[in-house]
Structure formats: C-alpha cells, structure tokens
Image (spheres, grey):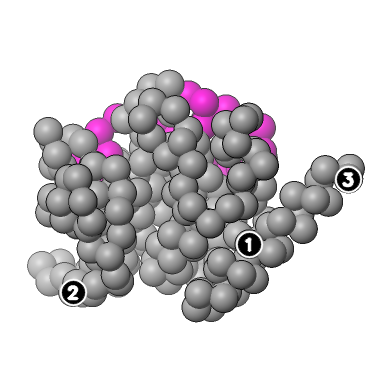
Amino acid sequence: MNQQRDYASRRAWMVESQIRGRGIASPLVLTAMAQVPRETFVQPGDVDQAYDDGPLPIGCGQTISQPYMVALMAQALDLQGGEVVLDIGTGSGYAAAVLASIAARVFSIERIPELADAAGRRLVEQGYSNVVVRCGDGTLGWPEQAPFDGICVAAGAPAVPAQLQQQLRIGGHLVIPIGSMHTFQTLRRITRVSETEFHGQNLGDVRFVPLLGEQGWS
C-alpha cells in the first residue's frame, strides 16, 4: 500500500512537472497520464526510474517513450472520448493504455512477437479491455478496422505511409515522426481534410527508433 501511494505521488509529480509544466493542456490527456501506472510497463529493474524524464529500454532493442512525448502525441490526436484509434509500435503497451483511457477502442500493432505477447497480457492484467494487440507490419495499418479517428506511430518513418493516411477518417489525425533513420526526425500531424486532401503540421524535432516495414525502413 505504501509503495502504491509512492507511485501515485510520483505520477502526480510527473504530470505537473513534465507534462502540464511543458504545455500539455488537454484535460483528458492529463487525467490519463495521472491514471496509467507506468511502473507496470517498464522492466522490473527500472521501476524506480519509471517516472523519470526520459525513455527506458524494454528489451528487443526497443524503448518505452519519454512520458512527455506520449502526452504530446496523445494531445496531437485531439481525442475527445469515444474514438477508435490505431496505435503503431505497441512496445510495452504504455501508450496504448494512455490512449485507451480516453478512446473507446484502441487497436495496437507490434512487429516483435515477444513484445506483442507481453504487452497484450499486461494490458489485460491492468484491465484495459478496450485494447486489442496484434503482431504485424504496422506500416500497413489495420484495414479491416479502418477508418480510424486517430493514428499514433511510435517510430520514425522515411515518409508518411500511404496505407495509414488512407485508413484515417475524414477529420482524423495521424501523428508520426518523419526523417532520418539514425538521427533526429520531425514529429508531424497529418489531418485528413477530404477523401483526397491532407494537411500537415510540424510539431517539433524528436528522436525515435526506425519504423520497419513494407512502407517504412527496410
């Protein structure tokens, strides 16, 4: 019980200092970040660093994103509650849990079987029954569940995957890092304006692992 209170206190500090303090203003995102227990989505040896201001390794050469970055990307989706969201790059499942705390349903794709299996179990154990995880090529999206109100990609691509754009609902947002495989990328928000028209917006420089797949890096 004392440990749970300690984690709750750390979460509250994280939200105030790292999230709200850096300009994240969405009440739904702030509430989700305060609710999701990040310590359960990191490796056992890293639980003391769960609320530090940075990414952490989760195995298989992958990382759990910095809390602020998760919040920034969630806010950029402009979710109001009740949406259907596609999450690319499940990792440990943390971002999917944050999105599931706002959206009605989250479909999450992870290309590494070991991570996909672990994340799926973890999300079920934590009570996120509105998340479905599958192993596959995230660059191709999840066409049978499209269209999506929002698509969030936690890996850097050389260009915006056409398949993901086409799976957006009109008015929906795709948030994705675009740029070099090994250095910094630009976080982009792509809004579908019509059947054939998309509007792009730069949200700043970021650094993510490469997005591997048919419409990403080979």
**203 inside magenta stretch:** no
Q: Which residue is drawn at the image coordinates 58% and 53% (left, top)?
A: 52
Mark 2 crowd level (few <14, some 14–19, many ≥20, 10 Å Cα): few
Marked residue nearer the N-terminal end (3 or 1) = 3
Measure how far apart labels 1 and 2 are at the Cα level. Answer: 32 Å
Q: What amino acid type should be assigned to the residue bearing mark 1?
A: Met
Q: What amino acid type should be assigned to the residue bearing mark 2?
A: His
CB contact under 8 Å: marks 3 and 1: no
Per the image, the residue denoted by label 2 is 199
Q: Which residue is drawn at the image coordinates 52% and 26% (left, top)?
A: 118
Q: Nearer the viewer, mark 1 or mark 2?
A: 1
Per the image, the residue denoted by label 3 is 2
Marked residue nearer the N-terminal end (2 or 3) = 3
26 lies above or below 131: below
Q: What amino acid type should be assigned to the residue bearing mark 3?
A: Asn
Per the image, the residue denoted by label 1 is 14
Q: Nearer the viewer, mark 2 or mark 3?
A: 3
Q: In the picture, residue 2 is in which quadrant?
A: top right
Residue 210 spot, x, y in % from top left: 24, 42
Label 1 sits on a secondary structure element that is helix
Label 3 sits on a secondary structure element that is helix
Marked residue nearer the N-terminal end (1 or 2) = 1
Magenta-highlighted residues: 117-141
Residue 173 in sight: yes
